[in-house]
Image (cartoon, rainbow, N blue to C red):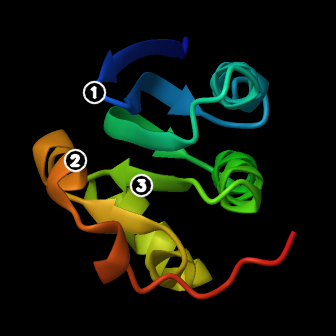
Amino acid sequence: MKLTVATTERDDVTIVTVSGEVDVYTAPQLRSALEERIAAGHTAIIVDLQDVGFLDSTGLGVLVGRLKAVKKVDGWLRVVCTNERILRLFGITGLDRVIAIHDTVEAALAADPDDLVEPDVSA
């Protein structure tokens, strides 16, 4: 399945909306989109996975790598996801304790950065 990645800005936050499947073949497309935004100085990022039907370990690796990159410059990355299969993957890998996951973009936008319980992700 094809992957589409679209970005929008809301205030000082970049929202990256992803649709399709994120796997070994499509993850580079997501990585590239996120790296472009970070390189442009956008370090408050929400990755909306609501329209993603499949996410594998390569996709998780992209998210963790970009989280490390934004944390280096005091930024943050949050994920929007309600897909039970994908949430289970975050739980099994323990990444649900590293990456803040929200039910909606609005909830992710409203989250207080000081309330995030994200362990330090070393670069």
Q: Nearer the viewer, mark 3 or mark 2?
A: 2
Q: Quadrant of residue 86?
A: bottom left
Amino acid under disc 3: Arg
Residue type at mark 1: give it: Asp
Disc 1 marks which residue?
Answer: 11
- Vertical placement of residue 59 versus 110, above or below: above
Q: Position of residue 6 (x, y in %)?
A: 44, 12
**Which element is circle 2 on?**
helix
Q: Please name the residue that numbered disc 2 is placed on.
A: 109
Q: Position of residue 22 (x, y in %)?
A: 59, 34
Dot 3 and dot 2 residues touching (CB under 8 Å): no
Element under disc 3: strand
Return the disc, 1 or 3, that comes first in the chain's sequence.
Answer: 1
Q: Quadrant of the N terminus?
A: top right
Q: Is residue 89 above or below residue 37?
A: below
**Residue in the image at 73% along x and 31% along y:** 31
Disc 3 target residue: 78
